[in-house]
Image (cartoon, rainbow, N blue to C red):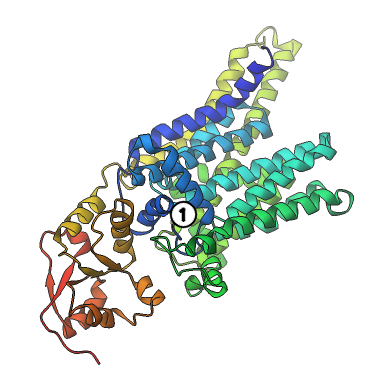
């Protein structure tokens, strides 16, 4: 039984980190359906549909599995939210594994995992359904697999290649989840060549195996999109059955215009500094110092993590998104790694000085071995790692805590109650996704037709006005539009506000004859 004890002890930091993260997220978990992308991610797995670009096939398949396995824990929405909590908790566990492997210090590994769990942006992504939670987990797992391969390539080069192949599979799954994975490629390539410059020549079978694993995994995952789309699922974004439509979804052609000019170098550095400080408090400068420490003490890991950090930050600085904080998850993960390695390095020097003092015969007994001193120093170091991040949480807790967010449920119930039989409702994304959840996941109101702006485009319906004119003679028509779109409709139609609908998503019934649009 002896060999079991070291294995159990080594697993404690990962398990402890995961448990702490799950406790935090379970107490703040979104209890029901939401609006916007969250509602789509809550629905997409349960109906095995096609999500918005880039399709997120890896996430969709995993969300479907979660919707089956997590049935005892609540509704489909809750299961999808819980999946994010599990993925973020898993990321914390993997970070603990990485730090334990690099430093051999289990308390510091536990501290690093807990530190990641309390980073506000990371915590926030773990309480609601979102494919970015899976991206965070897969990136952390990819990093650990690369570290294991680097160690094995020195001790057992002939058998170590399987870890690199496993990393290639994870990279393929990550590509099938989010296009941000492409930004990791330069760092991975540099790391691999620094570890084994002759890999493509001396171990070409491993190199070929990695390429095959990456391609087969990526293509296999993305094959879900046209195959499932051909079955006409309830949610079928852009209908990617044809090569043109598939390219549109996979390469995110819809978002090509959503980039802004990059800020100046000084402005960009200042912005990133503010982001790190907001999420990590006084640990932010420690993390940046940790980048230097990592580059000096673990140079290959330094190249990998600095490349991942810089490229992802550059992309996020130029990308326009309603929730751009999600695009800083990987940089925050890396910052936690850097901070943990910096604090551990200082701890190592302190413990070394303590041992030297204890061994000095001139200490006259003052330096006698006190095992408790080393433990106390390690505990203090772990607290130093976690405390600055924990200190910023109270100021952001209201934004993190989703346990009282029931607006979407109240809005959905009121809307489905108010809509007349056989109604057509012309909506936009933030509210369409919530109604899709109610219509296709909860199977309510099968009589209504929900027409999103995407539906208008996919089915060639023209525009909102032409949709109203098409359905108004035969069916009740309702609209949900942004305030800036209302004047045009009010000039053409008699819009009557539907009573009893929460003000977060006002609904209008198209009444009267209105103007005839030609």
Name the residue rendered at 55%, 42% in the picture. 336
When asked about the image quadrant of residue 433, the answer is: bottom left
Side of 310 relative to 28 (left or right):
right
Name the residue rendered at 41%, 59% in the picture. 323
Side of 423 relative to 198 (left or right):
left
Q: Mark 1: which secondary structure?
A: helix
Q: Which residue is mark 1?
A: 326
Q: Count residues near mark 1 (Cα–Cα under 10 Å), then give few for <14, some for 14-19, many for 20+.
A: some
Along the viewing direction, whichever of 414 and 21 lies nearer the viewer:
414
Percent from the top left, x then y, of residue 445?
23, 58
Percent from the top left, x then y, of residue 247?
56, 71
Percent from the top left, x then y, of residue 454?
38, 71
Query: Which residue is farthest top?
Result: 365
Side of 349 relative to 421 (left or right):
right
Classify 416 as above or below 371.
below
When asked about the image quadrant of residue 163, the answer is: top right
Query: On the rendered image, what quadrant is the N terminus found in?
Result: top right
Along the viewing direction, whichever of 57 and 268 lies nearer the viewer:
57
Side of 449 relative to 493 (left or right):
right
């Amino acid at each position: 039984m002896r060999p079991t004890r070291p294995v159990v002890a080594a697993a404690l930091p990962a398990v402890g980190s995961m448990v702490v993260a799950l406790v935090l997220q379970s107490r703040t978990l979104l209890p029901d359906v939401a609006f916007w992308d969250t509602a789509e991610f809550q629905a997409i797995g349960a109906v095995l549909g096609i999500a918005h670009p880039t399709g997120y096939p890896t996430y969709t398949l995993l969300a479907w599995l979660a919707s089956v396995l997590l049935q005892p824990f609540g509704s489909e929405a809750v299961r999808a939210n819980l999946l994010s909590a599990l993925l973020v908790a898993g990321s914390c566990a993997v970070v603990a594994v990485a730090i334990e492997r690099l430093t051999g210090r289990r308390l510091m590994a536990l501290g690093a995992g807990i530190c990641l769990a309390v980073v506000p942006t990371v915590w926030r992504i773990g309480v609601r359904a979102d494919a970015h939670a899976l991206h965070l987990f897969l990136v952390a797992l990819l990093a650990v697999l690369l570290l294991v391969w680097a160690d094995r390539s020195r001790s057992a080069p002939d058998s170590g290649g399987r870890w690199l192949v496993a990393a290639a599979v994870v990279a393929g799954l990550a590509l099938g989840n989010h296009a941000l994975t492409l930004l990791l490629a330069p760092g991975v390539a540099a790391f691999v060549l620094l570890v084994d410059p002759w890999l493509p020549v001396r171990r070409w079978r491993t190199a070929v195996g990695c390429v095959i694993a990456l391609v087969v995994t990526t293509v296999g995952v993305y094959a879900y999109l046209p195959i499932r789309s051909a079955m006409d699922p309830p949610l079928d974004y852009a209908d990617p059955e044809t090569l043109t439509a598939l390219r549109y979804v996979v390469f995110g052609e819809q978002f090509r215009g959503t980039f802004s000019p990059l800020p100046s170098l000084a402005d960009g550095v200042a912005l990133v500094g503010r982001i790190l400080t907001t999420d990590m408090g006084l640990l932010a400068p420690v993390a940046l110092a940790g980048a230097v420490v990592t580059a000096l003490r673990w140079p290959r890991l330094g190249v990998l993590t600095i490349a991942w950090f810089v490229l992802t930050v550059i992309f996020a600085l130029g990308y326009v998104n309603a929730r751009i904080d999600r695009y800083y998850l990987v940089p925050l993960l890396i910052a936690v790694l850097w901070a943990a390695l910096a604090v551990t390095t200082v701890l190592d020097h302190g413990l070394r000085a303590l041992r030297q003092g204890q061994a000095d015969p001139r200490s006259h007994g003052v330096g006698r071995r006190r095992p408790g001193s080393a433990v106390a120093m390690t505990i203090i170091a772990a607290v130093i790692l976690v405390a600055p991040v924990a200190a910023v949480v109270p100021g952001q807790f209201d934004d993190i805590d989703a346990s009282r967010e029931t607006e979407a449920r109240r809005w959905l119930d009121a809307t489905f109650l108010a809509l007349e039989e056989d109604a057509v409702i012309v909506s936009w994304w933030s509210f369409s996704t919530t109604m899709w959840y109610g219509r296709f996941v909860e199977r309510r109101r099968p009589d209504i037709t929900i027409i999103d702006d995407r539906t208008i485009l996919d089915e060639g319906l023209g525009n909102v006005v032409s949709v109203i004119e098409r359905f108004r003679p035969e069916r009740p028509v309702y609209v949900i539009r942004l305030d800036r779109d209302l004047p045009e409709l009010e000039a053409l139609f008699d819009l009557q506000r539907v009573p009893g609908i929460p003000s977060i998503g006002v609904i209008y019934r198209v009444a009267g004859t209105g103007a005839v649009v030609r």
